[in-house]
């Protein structure tokens, strides 16, 4: 699932995400690279809604249902998402109906998990503008931001989740910590969190690990 601040990009915008899909296909998985409606100022061709929450997560959940009933599929669906796509991996692992529109497993690379966390960070201005635009509220509307946040929606039934962030990631590093804290408070153990050195972001993390380095 591609990223792009919820308002830009396409499934082929990131070469690393294309390689990820190719690697999954080569490993024997049926791999889909999906798109979703975009928040302003972005829009897909023919898009008539504003693309704000929950339009995009609804689109991802529709893709999950579609993949699950694909005749080539064994009925189980996982997702790898980067940045905004990492948010959707976490959101769809935490919400929805198991066996239907909930992921069976999710991988969030530089994902956003608590849209209400505006802790000091070098990238806070961009993060704040992006998530408030996505939800369509101002930054002080904590309740609305949390209603769209995996770290506030997940319960003990969350599907297995792998989260990866670099310590200097353009995605505020606290986002992964927010999700960890919430899952730990629930007693959830079916997750793994991996911190990488440097500032590698989203799907580039896969390439960094493959080559044994950081960025």
Image (tube, rainbow, N blue to C red):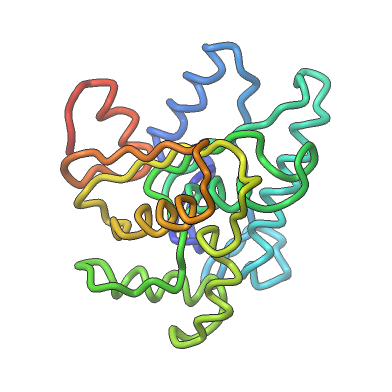
91 w.r.t. 193: above or below? below
The quadrant of the picture occupied by the N terminus is top right
For image coordinates 56% across by 36% down, the residue present is 160
In the picture provided, is 146 more to the left or to the right than 72?
left
Give the image location of residue 68, x and y in percent. 77, 31
Would you identify the image quadrant in which residue 203 lies?
Answer: top left
Instruction: Work out whether residue 164 or residue 179 is closer to the camera in this orientation and state it.
Output: 179
In the picture provided, is 176 more to the left or to the right than 185?
left
Instruction: Work out whether residue 213 or residue 13 is closer to the camera in this orientation and state it.
Output: 213
Give the image location of residue 31, x and y in percent. 61, 25
Instruction: Work out whether residue 141 or residue 65 is closer to the camera in this orientation and state it.
Output: 141
27 w.r.t. 65: above or below? above
51 w.r.t. 165: above or below? below
Would you identify the image quadrant in which residue 201 lies?
Answer: top left
The quadrant of the picture occupied by the C terminus is top left
For image coordinates 56% across by 80% down, the residue present is 143
For image coordinates 48% across by 77% down, the residue present is 132
For image coordinates 51% across by 39% down, the residue present is 161
Q: How many marks?
A: 0
In the picture provided, is 166 more to the left or to the right than 158?
left
Give the image location of residue 121, x and y in percent. 22, 68
In the picture provided, is 4 more to the left or to the right than 172?
right
Give the image location of residue 186, x and y in percent. 53, 53
């Amino acid at each position: 699932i591609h990223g792009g601040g919820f308002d830009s990009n396409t499934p082929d915008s990131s070469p690393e995400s294309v390689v990820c899909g190719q690697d999954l296909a080569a490993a024997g998985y049926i791999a889909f690279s999906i798109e979703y409606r975009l928040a302003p100022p972005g829009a897909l061709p023919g898009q008539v809604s504003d693309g704000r929450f929950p339009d995009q997560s609804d689109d991802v959940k529709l893709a999950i249902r579609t993949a699950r009933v694909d005749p080539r599929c064994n009925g189980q669906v996982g997702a790898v998402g980067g940045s905004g796509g990492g948010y959707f991996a976490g959101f769809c692992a935490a919400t929805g109906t198991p066996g239907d529109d909930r992921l069976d497993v999710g991988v969030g690379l530089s994902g956003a998990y608590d849209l209400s966390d505006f802790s000091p960070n070098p990238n806070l201005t961009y993060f704040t503008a992006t998530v408030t635009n996505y939800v369509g509220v101002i930054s002080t509307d904590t309740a609305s931001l949390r209603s769209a946040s995996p770290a506030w929606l997940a319960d003990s039934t969350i599907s297995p989740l792998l989260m990866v962030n670099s310590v200097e990631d353009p995605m505020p590093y606290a986002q992964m910590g927010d999700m960890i804290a919430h899952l730990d408070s629930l007693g959830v153990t079916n997750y793994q969190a991996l911190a990488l050195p440097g500032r590698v972001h989203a799907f580039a993390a896969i390439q960094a690990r493959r080559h044994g380095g950081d960025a």
